[in-house]
Each structure stands twice: as structure tokens, then as C-alpha cells.
Image (spheres, grey):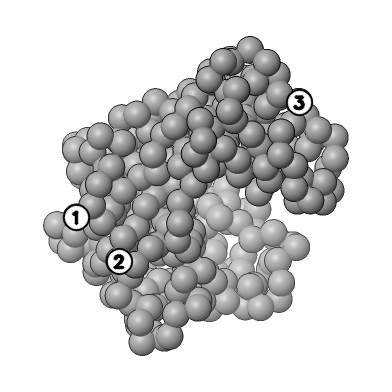
């Protein structure tokens, strides 16, 4: 097995050793792994999974190794990649190619992609060039969801409860005060969702800009392990709020705490009705703002940006 310095520079050496042992155990029983290697651990979530660079059958790949007790997650992710790969394996909007699955050892391999994670690209890009990526991001998500979209009675009560739990956990007093006011606005919007249907689909599940790899004018989605049938608005809110709470507003126009041009791009690509645009999407943006609770370890600048985002969201929710 090829080993890089990164493999040994992680703080939890016992966990790193466990990942290496799991990989070698799979190699000892799987003939298809004879030409496979594990070169570098990119990310390690102790007790859950490791993301590693390596090779399988002569191809550069990214290994996703699910640790003890998490093996079923590998099968779920593999099955979802098998479902979506025939639909999104060519053109400007793709998913990464699935290469190998070992159910017994909880491992999958996908192609290693050239390119740059989208949020990284946006920070590096000239300000005037950033907004051009908003509509392609909306197109990528519509490609992912369109074949499985359907309408169901809105499950807004469950989402409202999640938002309330998140607001109560907020450790920063100034943010918590804003979020309790946001929660009141969500309760008001929720009353307008009684008896309303909203769209659901098999969605990405963790659709933030760094799970899109940009290369020239193409976008390739990665990390689809959280895919499930959920309201389409949840992934849209995740994408826009991930940028908004970090102060990334590519067009320079903010609405509901996020990029106005991006919000309109998603609404247009999904051909949203007035109810979706004016009630459901604002509701889900508020939910996303509250369920992503800031941690005490975040920098002061991150907290200030989050407060600005929440204040802008509250102001526009009150005006709806």
C-alpha cells in the first residue's frame, strides 16, 4: 500500500491505523483489489467514515471507507450512484463515476475528479465573475431531481420542530435572539402551508457548493451519500444558506439572507409556482438557517457573518 505523510499527520493515529487495517483486510479477500492502493487520507470522521485518495484497477480514485457499524451506508451510497449514473454520466452536469463497491468491508471507490470545489472557486474568482455559476448550480440540481419529482402534502410541522430544536441549541446569545424571531416568522408561514402540497424528489442530501466540482464550464456532483426523498427546497436552501452564512453573495444582491440571483435561478429552473417562491422556499430557507447551529469553536468573523445573514433573513421574512 502506498503511504503518504498525510496518512500519519492526523491526530487520531489509532483511527488512521483502523482505516488502513480495514483496507488491507478487504485486499486480502477481494481479488478485484489486487491492483488497488490507499495513498492518502483526506478526511476522517472517527467512528463513521474516512475519505481517501488512492487507486483501483489502475485508475485514480477516491475511496469512501465506512467504519465499523456504518457498512450499510456504503451500500446505500453505492445504490444511489448506480441509480443516478445512467442519467448523469455525460454533458455539463454529471455525477462522479462509481468504480467499485465492497459491501462486506463498507468501501466504495469513485473516480477522482480534476477541477475545483465550487465554493473555493468562487472565493478565488473576480467578483464580477462569481454570479455566472449560480444558474449552472441550479441546473445541476434539477437534472438530479427531475426524474423522481412528485407532489405530496407538505410535512412542514416536522421541519418546524427541527428548526425550533436548533434555535434552542444556538450557543451565541445575539444569534439565538435573532433565531427565535425567525422561528416566529416560520410559524406564521407554516400556517399558510396547511393543506398545501409541495414537491419531493430523491435529492442530493448535502447540496453545498463544495460538493460540486467545477472544471471549465462543467459541474460534477460528489458525496451523494445523504440522498433521500425529501422536499426539493431543502437542497436549494442548503446550497444558498451555506454561502450566505459565510458572506458569499456572488451577485452582490442579498434577499432572505442569501444571494437573490441564486434564489431566482433555482426558482426559475424548477419552474416554481407563486406559493413555492413566496411561502415554501422562504420557509425552508428559515429552517435551514436554524438547524445548522454554529459551534463555539467558530471564529468571530464567521459569527459576525452569520448574524448578518440572520438579520437580513429576518427582515425579509417580516416583509413577506
Above or below: residue 138 compared with residue 190: below
| Dot 3 alpha-carbon crowd within 10 angstroms: few under 14, some 14 to 19, many 20 or more | few
Q: What is the spatial separation of the Cα atoms under label 2 and label 1, in whole angstroms?
A: 21 Å
Q: Is residue 239 left or right of residue 279?
A: right
Residue 219 appears in the figure: yes
Picture residue at 71% right of the left edge, 33% below the top? 1
Give the class, few, some or many, for how many residues have Cα within 10 Å of label 2's Cα (few <14, many ≥20).
Answer: few
- Please provide percent x and percent y for residue 241: 45, 64
Spatial CA span between label 3 and label 1: 46 Å
| Relative height, residue 307 to residue 206 (above, below) | below
What percent of the width, then of the height, locates residue 315?
Answer: 41, 77
What residue would you read off at disc 2?
A: 217
Q: Which numbered disc, 2 or 1, marks the residue that appears first in the sequence? A: 2
Residue 104 in the figure: left or right of residue 190:
right
Q: Nearer the viewer, mark 2 or mark 1?
A: 2
Q: Residue at x 61, y 56 (%)?
A: 293
Q: Earlier in the sequence, mark 3 or mark 1?
A: 3
Q: Nearer the viewer, mark 3 or mark 1?
A: 3
Q: Which residue is mark 1?
A: 270
Residue 276, image x, y percentages: 22, 56
Q: Which residue is mark 3?
A: 21
Amino acid at each position: 500500500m502506498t503511504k503518504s505523510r498525510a496518512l500519519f499527520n492526523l491526530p487520531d493515529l489509532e483511527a488512521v491505523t483502523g482505516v488502513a487495517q480495514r483496507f488491507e483486510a478487504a485486499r486480502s479477500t477481494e481479488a478485484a483489489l489486487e491492483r488497488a492502493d490507499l495513498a492518502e487520507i483526506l478526511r476522517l470522521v472517527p467512528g463513521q467514515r474516512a475519505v481517501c485518495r488512492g487507486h483501483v484497477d489502475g485508475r485514480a480514485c477516491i475511496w469512501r471507507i465506512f467504519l465499523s457499524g456504518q457498512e450499510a451506508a456504503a451500500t446505500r451510497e453505492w445504490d444511489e450512484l448506480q441509480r443516478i449514473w445512467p442519467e448523469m454520466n455525460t454533458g455539463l452536469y454529471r455525477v462522479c463515476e462509481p468504480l467499485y463497491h465492497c459491501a462486506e468491508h463498507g468501501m466504495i471507490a469513485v473516480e477522482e475528479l480534476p477541477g475545483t470545489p465550487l465554493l473555493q472557486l468562487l472565493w478565488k474568482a473576480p467578483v464580477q465573475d462569481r454570479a455566472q455559476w449560480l444558474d449552472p448550480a441550479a441546473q445541476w440540481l434539477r437534472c438530479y431531481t427531475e426524474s423522481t419529482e412528485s407532489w405530496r402534502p407538505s410535512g412542514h410541522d416536522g421541519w418546524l420542530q427541527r428548526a425550533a430544536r436548533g434555535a434552542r441549541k444556538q450557543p451565541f446569545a445575539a444569534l439565538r435572539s435573532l433565531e427565535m424571531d425567525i422561528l416566529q416568522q416560520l410559524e406564521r408561514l407554516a400556517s399558510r402551508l396547511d393543506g398545501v402540497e409541495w414537491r419531493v424528489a430523491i435529492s442530493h442530501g448535502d447540496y453545498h457548493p463544495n460538493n460540486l466540482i467545477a472544471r471549465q464550464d462543467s459541474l460534477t456532483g460528489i458525496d451523494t451519500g445523504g440522498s433521500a426523498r425529501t422536499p426539493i427546497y431543502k437542497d436549494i436552501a442548503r446550497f444558498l444558506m451555506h454561502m450566505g452564512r459565510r458572506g458569499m453573495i456572488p451577485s452582490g444582491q442579498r434577499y432572505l439572507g442569501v444571494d437573490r440571483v441564486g434564489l431566482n435561478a433555482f426558482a426559475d429552473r424548477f419552474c416554481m409556482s407563486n406559493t413555492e417562491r413566496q411561502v415554501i422556499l422562504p420557509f425552508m430557507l428559515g429552517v435551514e438557517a436554524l438547524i445548522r447551529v454554529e459551534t463555539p469553536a467558530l471564529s468571530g468573523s464567521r459569527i459576525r457573518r452569520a448574524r448578518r445573514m440572520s438579520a437580513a433573513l429576518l427582515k425579509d421574512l417580516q416583509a413577506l
